Image: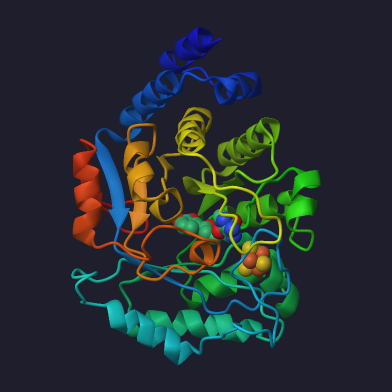
Amino acid sequence: MLDSIRDKVFSGQRLTKEDAVALFQSDDLFAIGRLASHVAENKNGKNAYFIVNRHINPTNICVNRCKFCAFSRSKGEEGAYELTIEEIIEKLKDGHGSRVTDHGFSEVHIVGGLHPDWPFEYYLNMLSAIKKEFPPIAIKAFTAVEIDYMSKISGLSLEETLMELKKSGLDLMPGGGAEIFAEGIRNKLCPEKISGDRWLEVMETAHRVGIKTNATMLYGHLEGIGDRVDHLFKLRDLQDRTGGFQAFIPLAYHPKNTEIGGFYSSGIDDLKTIAVSRLVLDNFDHIKAYWIMLGEKISQVALLFGADDIDGTIIEEKITHSAGAMTEEGMTREELMHLIKRAGKIPVQRDAFYNEL
Ligand code: V47
Ligand code: SF4
């Protein structure tokens, strides 16, 4: 089976769902990794991208309370917080020009809970305040789940919601909230969350109005191989139609302090998932090994298994660290470059749109 997959990859034929299942079932991690690495080098050469960025989570108060999420709180619960726009601006000023970001941020990544009381204007004001204070920083903000919620609270259509956000400064969107599209598992993991089809609809609308996005898949919880494969193929189909996805990021489930519990993903599964994603998502330019979740060392090795991006400096990370992440919360530019170089790759500092800096 791997032989026929190898032939397809080398002759540029698309893999089928059966091929993807066979890859996930195979124990020949090296063969899969070598194939994925071949594809990655065809697309991006020896380049491995990173970005000087900062994460901001405006609030952890969330009406959804997904069962895999250790970050969220209900309103009034101990540990619940909400940031003002001034506090967000202060956070961005803090790291700007510091040791961690001696070249300034290229991007701010903003995601948070679905707050029961904040009006749509809060989000618009947040974007325009950041743009006014830091014009060169690209704003990558709000998952499809948050966009759907904003459309509900504002009474606007998806398209109008996205256009308003864009006018206020939204540059692109992160890939979170996709989790796993399979309905049965999704209902167990996050019964209150929008469906997989709605997630795809929000992304399709974003692409149509000219907003690039990423895509993710949460793996290592209750899902099976078939669920992963279906998820990847839905993303590949949408990308065929819109071309609006920049990068795919497999998110390794972290079990601590969550309602569903379970185990951390294994390093073998992490590398295989990166490699199979690279092979299946032939229409995605970039596969990101998110070091916060994979760990610094697995994400470095992932650069030899099909990944071409390890994300960025981050500075402050709450979502994975609430669920038992074992990584630091941030890395310096120099540390990221060191990891990449020691993997035999060329570190390329990028902006939010993969332009080399
Ligand atoms: O949507 C929540 C996930 C996502 C857990 O687009 C968990 O560049 C693991 O989407 N274990 C947010 N994952 C993170 C995200 C992201 C991160 C970095 C870059 C980009 C990008 C996107 O984290 C959530 C959810 O899918 N998540 N809880 C958990 N216990
Ligand atoms: Fe809320 Fe997102 Fe956490 Fe779900 S994953 S509870 S939507 S913050």
Residue displayed at 37% across by 44% down: 299
Left or right, 293 with respect to 124, comes to left
Residue displayed at 48% across by 79% down: 127
Residue displayed at 80% across by 53% down: 187
Foreground residue among 320 and 37: 320
Foreground residue among 258 and 34: 258
Would you place residue 300 above or below residue 86 in this image?
above
Q: Quadrant of ligand 1?
A: bottom right
Residue displayed at 62% across by 41% down: 238
Left or right, 106 with respect to 76, comes to left
| Residue 138 image offset from top left, x and y in percent | 38, 68
Applied colour scheme? rainbow
Left or right, 85 with respect to 145, comes to left
Numbered disc total = 0
| Residue 296 image offset from top left, x and y in percent | 34, 50
Would you place residue 239 above or below residue 28 in this image?
below
